[in-house]
Amino acid sequence: MALTKTIEIDQLEIIGPYKAIGVQEKTVIKEDDKEISSSIHRKILNCGDLDATDNLVDTDVSSESTDVQNLCNTYWTTDIKNAYKAHLVATKPILETKS
């Protein structure tokens, strides 16, 4: 009885004006080459996040598959990053301070 577990990219998509990358992975458990279980995991990667001083910090995709890294490098241009940063700054919640 040999159990194996594989994780493969099931679907990739480009989402919205800021080119978020949708990654759907399928995990398959097999016993003697017969599938006994599978599950789907989905995540969305954006090109970055704001730091405390409103600088855009690039998303680290070094642990992602080569296919995902290639999509990020292709779609996350300087123009996209600048537009996304402007969007994040414009929609950032205003924190009130107590007097």
Image: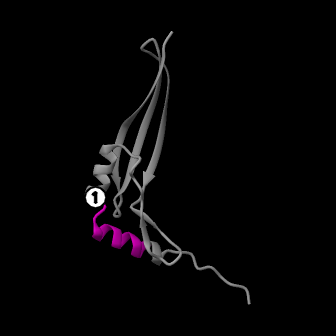
Residue kind at label 1, given as amino acid type: Tyr
The answer to if 5 sits in the magenta stretch is no
Q: Residue furthest top?
A: 1
The answer to if 81 sits in the magenta stretch is yes
Which residue is at 35% across, 63% downward? 18
* Residue 61 higher or lower than 42, as above or below: below
Q: Position of residue 10 (x, y in %)?
A: 37, 36
Tell me the crowding category of disc 1: few under 14, some 14 to 19, or many 20 or more residues within 10 angstroms, Cα based.
Answer: some
User: In the rendered image, which quarter contains the C terminus?
Assistant: bottom right
Q: Position of residue 80 (x, y in %)?
A: 31, 67
Q: Position of residue 89 (x, y in %)?
A: 46, 76
State the scheme by which the image is colored.
one colour
* Residue 64 higher or lower than 72, as above or below: above
Which residue is at 49% across, 74% downward? 91
Between 77 and 86, the one nearer to me in the picture = 77
From the image, tell me which residue sits under label 1.
Answer: 75
Q: Is residue 95 left or right of residue 17?
A: right
Q: Which residues are magenta?
A: 76-87
* Residue 36 higher or lower than 1, as above or below: below
